[in-house]
């Protein structure tokens, strides 16, 4: 008996929780690469303003872009160690969920430029990255708590730990930035 597959079913998006461990790790690599590009674009935007404060923000975002590229490289190594050169066609575009998406709202752009919020530009840029990393860690934590498959639970915990370590590193940078700038912590 032949199964009939509708043409549009082939390209339907899936939930991250439905991915195999190979697919999930592959998508996690794409997420890190996407974030590197987002941070790079943020840096370019702020550099274009040409003001000292904007250049400080740009430098922070360029640093974060480089870190995300390093994170992607670490995940690529894990992928190669586990799966070798086995291909995987699933990418972030095939997944419904938005994971670890750094967001810069229009209002924040104006806050950055006014700098009357008691925080340095570097602090504000780091806070955006921390929020993205923490959201990713919470997302992977939820998946690890709800999945029934031991292999997937272990991968989700690994990804959660990976994101939490990124967040911890950024928190240390933020603490250093606060010490040197005399900035304040958000309530």
Image (cartoon, grey):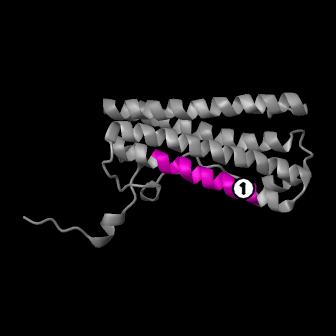
Q: Which residues are magenta?
A: 28-44
Q: Residue furthest left?
A: 1
* Residue 156 pos. (x, y %): 43, 34
Q: Verify whether residue 157 appears in magenta.
A: no
* Residue 72 pos. (x, y %): 52, 44
Q: Who's the residue at 37% across and 62% down the image?
A: 12
Q: From this viewpoint, is residue 119 visible? A: yes
Q: Who's the residue at 47% across and 45% down the image?
A: 28
Q: Residue furthest bottom?
A: 7
Judge the density around disc 1: few (<14), some (14-19), many (≥20) Cα neighbours within 10 Å. Answer: many
* Residue 10 pos. (x, y %): 31, 65
Q: From this viewpoint, is residue 148 visible? A: no
Quick one: SS at disc 1?
helix
* Residue 23 pos. (x, y %): 37, 47
Q: Is 96 left, or right, of 40 in this rendering?
A: left
Q: Considering the image in quadrants, where does the N terminus appear?
A: bottom left
Q: Who's the residue at 32% across and 32% down the image?
A: 151
Looking at the picture, does residue 161 appear above or below residue 41?
Answer: above
Q: Verify whether residue 39 appears in magenta.
A: yes
Q: Who's the residue at 71% across and 31% down the image?
A: 171
Total numbered labels: 1
Looking at the picture, does residue 169 appear above or below residue 23?
Answer: above
Q: Considering the image in quadrants, where does the C terminus appear?
A: top right
Q: Is 116 left, or right, of 78 in this rendering?
A: right
Which image quadrant for residue 177? top right
In the picture of the structure, the residue carrying the numbered disc 1 is 42
Q: Is 142 left, or right, of 37 in this rendering?
A: left
Overall secondary structure of the magenta stretch? helix
Q: Is 114 left, or right, of 185 in this rendering?
A: right
Q: Nearer the viewer, residue 134 or 82?
A: 82
């Amino acid at each position: 008996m032949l199964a009939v597959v509708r043409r549009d079913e082939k390209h339907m998006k899936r939930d991250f929780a439905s991915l195999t461990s190979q697919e999930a790790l592959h998508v996690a690599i794409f997420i890190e690469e996407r974030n590197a590009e987002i941070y790079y674009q943020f840096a370019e935007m702020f550099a274009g303003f040409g003001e000292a404060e904007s250049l400080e923000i740009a430098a922070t975002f360029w640093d974060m872009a480089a870190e995300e590229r390093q994170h992607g490289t670490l995940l690529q190594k894990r992928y190669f160690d586990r799966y070798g050169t086995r291909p995987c066609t699933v990418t972030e575009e095939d997944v419904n969920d938005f994971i670890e998406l750094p967001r810069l709202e229009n209002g924040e752009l104006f806050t950055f430029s006014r700098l009357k919020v008691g925080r340095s530009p570097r602090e504000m840029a780091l806070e955006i990255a921390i929020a993205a990393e923490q959201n990713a860690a919470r997302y992977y934590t939820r998946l690890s708590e709800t999945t029934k498959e031991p292999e997937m639970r272990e991968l989700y915990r690994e990804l959660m730990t990976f994101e939490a370590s990124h967040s911890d590193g950024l928190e240390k940078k933020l603490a250093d930035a606060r010490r040197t700038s005399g900035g304040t912590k958000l309530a």
